[in-house]
Image (cartoon, helix red, strand yellow):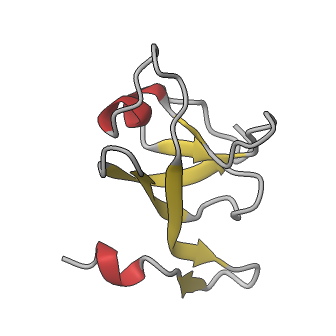
Amino acid sequence: MADGTNMDPNGDNAASRTLPLGTTAKVTNIETGQSAVVTIQDRGPYARGRIVDLSPATAHNIGITQKIGVAKVQVAPIAVPLPDGSIRPGVAAQDAKP
């Protein structure tokens, strides 16, 4: 993966072209309402119209099966790492608090 780690198909990892590596984000399947928290560890997807690639386990957890393959999702950053090493709260930071 772009952050130097191995891809874990059972992990909470995802790929984004726009969010910085290390960003924690909430991904919600718009159709099912199911969501998961992921860490952006790679770049992509490179298919037109797609905004995020999820690990197989995460996709399954929010209702995206191999048969379905793709779904409309909302991606909301929780914590965004900045170049100076600090962390900026994202738009979903409030939702992530217990």
Residue 41 placement, left or right of 94: right
Image quadrant where one finds the C terminus:
bottom left
Residue 26, given in percent of the width and then of the height, sits at: 43, 61
Residue 74, given in percent of the width and then of the height, sits at: 51, 58
Q: How many labels does the image show?
A: 0
Q: Is residue 67 above or below residue 35?
A: above
Residue displayed at 77% across by 52% down: 17
Residue displayed at 34% across by 52% down: 35
Image quadrant where one finds the N terminus:
top right
Residue displayed at 51% across by 43% down: 13
Taking depth in this image into account, of 87 and 94 the one nearest to the observer is: 94
Residue 79, given in percent of the width and then of the height, sits at: 51, 75
Please, which residue is most extreme toward the top here?
A: 67
Residue 16 placement, left or right of 67: right
Please, which residue is most extreme toward the left here?
A: 98
Residue displayed at 31% across by 36% down: 61
Residue 57, given in percent of the width and then of the height, sits at: 38, 29
